[in-house]
Image (cartoon, helix red, strand yellow):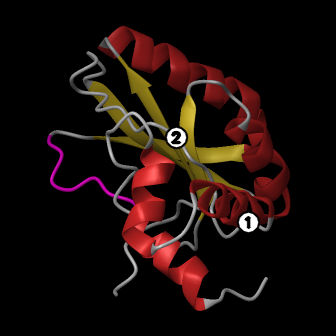
Amino acid sequence: MQLDDIDRQIIHATQAGLPLVAEPYQAIAAQLGLTADDVMQRMSKMHQDGVIRRIAAVPNHYKLGYHYNGMTVWDVEEEHVHRLGQRVAELPFVSHCYQRPRHLPDWPYNLFAMVHAKTEQDAERQIAVIAELLGDDVRRQAVLYSSKILKKTGLRIAG
């Protein structure tokens, strides 16, 4: 999909979130000199084309009581990482799942999956589910627990 200037203006107007008003699309439309229908149709098209991944509320998991947030990292055989990563990504408690390059010899991990839990025991149960799913294809793993939110935003494209 080729983005035009109006699509780019919509992205810039919404990348920090929709306005917290009764009619957010109308507010964006008024800001850009468009109709609310134009904004919704263009955003829908960008979503269908994969330019916009999703339109959703982004809750603060700490304020919701999820204090055990861990990036699990796994050393998985390369020939299995895509298939297994897809299965891990489908787990309802996994919010992010990525394949990333190893940096040997110091960093052998190539599969990353983020989990969120209210208790340490719940986090450990989630990690055990992932470990069981990955089975013998895992050589080693670790968990990097969050201790503080320093910044939490999506991609921001400069104006």
Give me the residue at 31% from left, 15% from top: 120
Left or right of 103? Residue 133 is right
Task: Tell whether 67 sits left or right of 45.
Answer: left
Q: At label 2, which amino acid type do we have?
A: Ala
Q: Residue at x 68, y 28 (%)?
A: 91
For the question of whether residue 155 can be seen, the reply is: no
Q: CA distance from mark 2 to mark 1?
A: 15 Å
Residues 22 and 70: in front is 22
Magenta stretch, main secondary structure, is: loop
x and y percent of residue 148 in the render?
Answer: 14, 42
Q: Residue at x 47, y 79 (%)?
A: 9
Where disc 1 sits, the SS reads: loop
Q: Are marks 2 and 1 in contact (CB under 8 Å)?
A: no
In the image, 138 versus 72, the foreground residue is: 72
The N terminus: image quadrant: bottom right
Quadrant hosting residue 31: bottom left
In the rendered structure, which amino acid carries the disc numbered 1?
Answer: Gly
Quadrant that contains the C terminus: bottom left
Vertical arrangement, residue 123 with respect to residue 45, above or below: above
Is 136 magenta? The answer is no
Report which quarter residue 6 is drawn in: bottom right
Tell me the magenta residue range. 148-154
User: What label does residue 56 carry, if any?
Assistant: 2
